[in-house]
Image (tube, grey):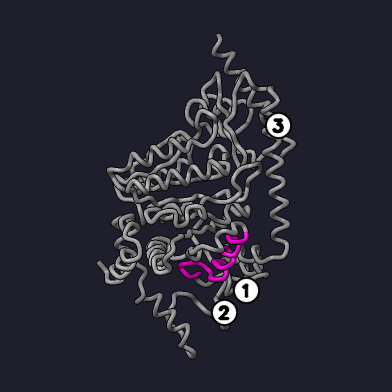
Amino acid sequence: MHSLASQLNDTIQRENPHVFDMLSNIGKLIYFPKEGILSQSAEAKAKAKKYNATIGIALENGQPMHLKVIQDKLSAFQPKDLYEYAPPAGKPELRAAWRQKMIEEQPALANYSFSNPIVTNALTHGLSIVADLFADSGDSVIIPDKNWENYELTFSIRRGAEMVYYPLYNDEMKFNATGLRDAILAQKDKGKAIVVLNFPNNPTGYTPGAEEGRQIVAALKEGAEAGINIVAVTDDAYFGLFFEDSLHESLFPSLYNVHPRILPVKVDGATKEEYVWGFRVGFITYAAPSSDLLAALEQKTLGVIRATISSGAHPSQTFVLHALTSPEFKAQKQEKYEIMKSRANRVKKLLDSGKYDDAWSYYPFNSGYFMCLKLKTVDAETLRQHLLDQYGVGTIALGQTDLRIAFSCIEEGNIDDLFDLIYSGVKDLEKALAK
């Protein structure tokens, strides 16, 4: 084991041995090199006033070399903010701006100790960092039965973890905190669990209410008190898109210092929040009372980044930073929020009209990009294919009964027509089955 990895491990074990026990084998071995190209280049940047022949970029006339055909399209930005490598942790100004944004949107964080957000290549990369640092073969990753399919690729296929499922909704069609608690307590023999909390939920668009949030925190705390080390991951991909009376904050602050056996990890990003899906700018943030522990986790995170993508794309970080610091940012974001909320409300009003009750019910939704129909009479995959072939309508089939609809990408004026076509598709298949 490298001495730097040993030093980080010693720090983590000293500050919180439970967090050390959460680390995977890779998590224990990984470190960010303090010697080598990066550190020598940083030293040269500070001291090499005459010639700096260290880092692998090209310079011309005192600025990063670039092609005019590209710079002409990006002339609002300086070449230094586009073409140089971004630091492995991301642009410092962007990290600071995102941290400030987190505190503004979740004021409780101002009183808590949490790491500076580290830039990731969007949320999937952030989740894969969690998997690398904390998931070993046979470890349990707890997610609801209605979930984003990429969790299985990220944690199970890549890292060999075992996926543990519980029903998202209880009999009252609220969040199933009892199911979550039971799934956590079932890991007592293993002594470890990774719990992914994704709200607004993909695919259902559901966010728990305040009381449900307290029940979730209580479920994790009960697991920790039973001796289970819990990596509590809040996947906040759709953060801020809360349209009704639900939690309007991440559970990340609520998990701070609940128990030494719970490590809160927040994965979020500009991807969905700021409508810049192709920019691939996300963040990973840790919370813990110990600044030394946070610093060690950051170094291990940077080690994973250095070993995989080296650093994120600089131009997209610059663009997001420019947006966050623009005087028009909040007003423009509010405008898009109102559009999204109006679409969600139109969907709910239409579904509550009773017009389609013989064909489907729907799972509770109050946030995010999506909602799910629960089909009563036809198979979801059969309907999905029929809608594509006969009506040119794209949907996502999940299991036998569930059909996911992304209202986020449907203009409000087209929502009625969309659901009328889906209903027509159901009726077509019912007729075919009756023959």
In percent of the image, x 58 and y 15: which residue is there? 430
Residue 393 image point, x, y percent: 62, 32
Residue 411 image point, x, y percent: 71, 40
Residue 195 image point, x, y percent: 42, 46
Residue 48 vs residue 63: left or right? left
Amino acid carrying label 1: it is Gln
Labels 1 and 3: the sequence-earlier one: 1
Labels 2 and 1: the sequence-earlier one: 2
Residue 157 visible in the shown view: yes
Amino acid carrying label 3: it is Lys
Q: For residue 306: magenta?
A: no
In percent of the image, x 27 and y 71: which residue is there? 3
- Name the residue beneath numbered marker 3: 349
Q: How many marks?
A: 3
- Name the residue beneath numbered marker 2: 63
> On screen, 205 above or below 309?
above
Residue 306 visible in the shown view: no
Of residue 232 and residue 394, the one placed in the foreground of this image is: 232
Of residue 323 and residue 266, the one placed in the foreground of this image is: 266
SS type, badge 2: strand
SS type, badge 3: helix
The magenta-colored residue range is 86-104
Crowding at label 1, few (<14), some or many (≥20) Cα neighbours within 10 Å? few
Image quarter of the N terminus: bottom left
- Name the residue beneath numbered marker 1: 78
Q: CA distance from mark 2 to mark 1?
A: 9 Å
Q: CA distance from mark 1 to mark 3?
A: 48 Å
Q: Quadrant of residue 276?
A: bottom right
Of residue 29 and residue 392, the one placed in the foreground of this image is: 29
Amino acid carrying label 2: it is Gln
